[in-house]
C-alpha cells in the first residue's frame, strides 16, 4: 500500500485499539509478513489474488460468523430438521481445506462446515490447495476426486507427504478409493451426501490417525 506505513503495521495498530477487529489481507505478497511458523497471525486472514466476488463474500461471511437465521445450506438438499439439530461443537482449532472446482458445491460445503464451528479454507484445484497448505496448518483435507489438472487423489498424496498427520476425506459420485488403494488412512463421502453424513465423517476423522504403509 502507498505511504510509509505497511499494511501489517496498520492492522496491528487497528487491532490494538479495537481488539475484536478482524483483519483480512488481500495480497499475494503479504504472506511472508503475516505467516509465522506455518500459521497466520492470530485474528488475521489471507485471501490471495486473484479472487472472485464469491470468494471474497464467502471469506467475509466466515470471518464474521454464520448467521443464526441461515439454516438452509444446499448440500444434497438436507432437511430443515437436520440443519437445526446439527451440533456446533467443533473445536475452533480444527482447520479444514475444501477442494472442489464446482464453486456452488464448494461454497455450500464450506458454509455448512463453518456453521459446525470449523475453520474452513477453500481451493478450486490442487494448485490453489497447495498454496493453502503452504500458508497455514490444515488438519483435514476434504477433496473432490475429479479436479482440473492434478486429481484429488494425487493432491491428497502430496498433502500427506507434506503433513503425515493430515486427515483426508474423498468426495466422489463414482467409485471411491480405500486406504489400501492410496496407502494412507482416509475416509470417503458419496455424492450426494447430507449434512449429518458430513458431520459424522469429519467427527470420525478427529480420532487416532495412522498410516497404512511406510
Image (spheres, rainbow, N blue to C red):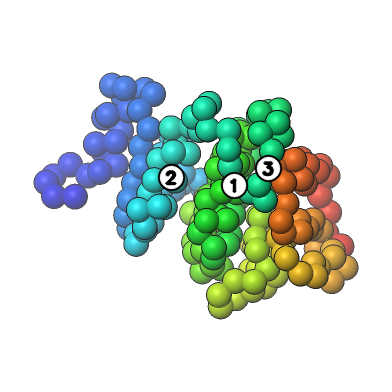
Is residue 81 shown to the viewer in this render?
A: yes
Which residue occupies 70% across, 31% down? 81
Quadrant for residue 115, please give it: top right
- Residue that label 2 marks: 59
- Residue that label 3 marks: 78
Name the secondary structure under disc 3: loop
Q: Position of residue 211 (x, y in %)?
A: 83, 59
Q: Distance between the residues labelled 3 and 1?
A: 7 Å
Relative to the observer, which residue lies in front, 165 or 153? Answer: 153
Residue at the left extreme of this rendering: 3
Name the secondary structure under disc 1: loop
Q: How far apart are marks 2 and 3 (CA)?
A: 23 Å
Which residue occupies 69% across, 38% down? 79
- Residue that label 1 marks: 74
Q: How many numbered marks have been drawn onto this rendered protein structure?
A: 3
Sequence order check, earlier mark of 2 and 1: 2
Amino acid at each position: 500500500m502507498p505511504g510509509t506505513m505497511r499494511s501489517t503495521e496498520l492492522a496491528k495498530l487497528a487491532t490494538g485499539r479495537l481488539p475484536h477487529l478482524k483483519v483480512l489481507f488481500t495480497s499475494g505478497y503479504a504472506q511472508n509478513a503475516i505467516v509465522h511458523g506455518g500459521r497466520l497471525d492470530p485474528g488475521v486472514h489471507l485471501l490471495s489474488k486473484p479472487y472472485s466476488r464469491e470468494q471474497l463474500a464467502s471469506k467475509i461471511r466466515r470471518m464474521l460468523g454464520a448467521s443464526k437465521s441461515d439454516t438452509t445450506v444446499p448440500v444434497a438438499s438436507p432437511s430443515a430438521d437436520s440443519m437445526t439439530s446439527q451440533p456446533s461443537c467443533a473445536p475452533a482449532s480444527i482447520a479444514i481445506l475444501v477442494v472442489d472446482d464446482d464453486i456452488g458445491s464448494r461454497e455450500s460445503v464450506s458454509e455448512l462446515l463453518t456453521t459446525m464451528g470449523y475453520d474452513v479454507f477453500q481451493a478450486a484445484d490442487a494448485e490453489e490447495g497447495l498454496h493453502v497448505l503452504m500458508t497455514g496448518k490444515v488438519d483435514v483435507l476434504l477433496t473432490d476426486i475429479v479436479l482440473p489438472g492434478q486429481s484429488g487423489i494425487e493432491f491428497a498424496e502430496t498433502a500427506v507427504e507434506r503433513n503425515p498427520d493430515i486427515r483426508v476425506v474423498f468426495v466422489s459420485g463414482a467409485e471411491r478409493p480405500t486406504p489400501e488403494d492410496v496407502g494412507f488412512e482416509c475416509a470417503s463421502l458419496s455424492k450426494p451426501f447430507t449434512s449429518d453424513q458430513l458431520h459424522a465423517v469429519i467427527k470420525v476423522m478427529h480420532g487416532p490417525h495412522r498410516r497404512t504403509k511406510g
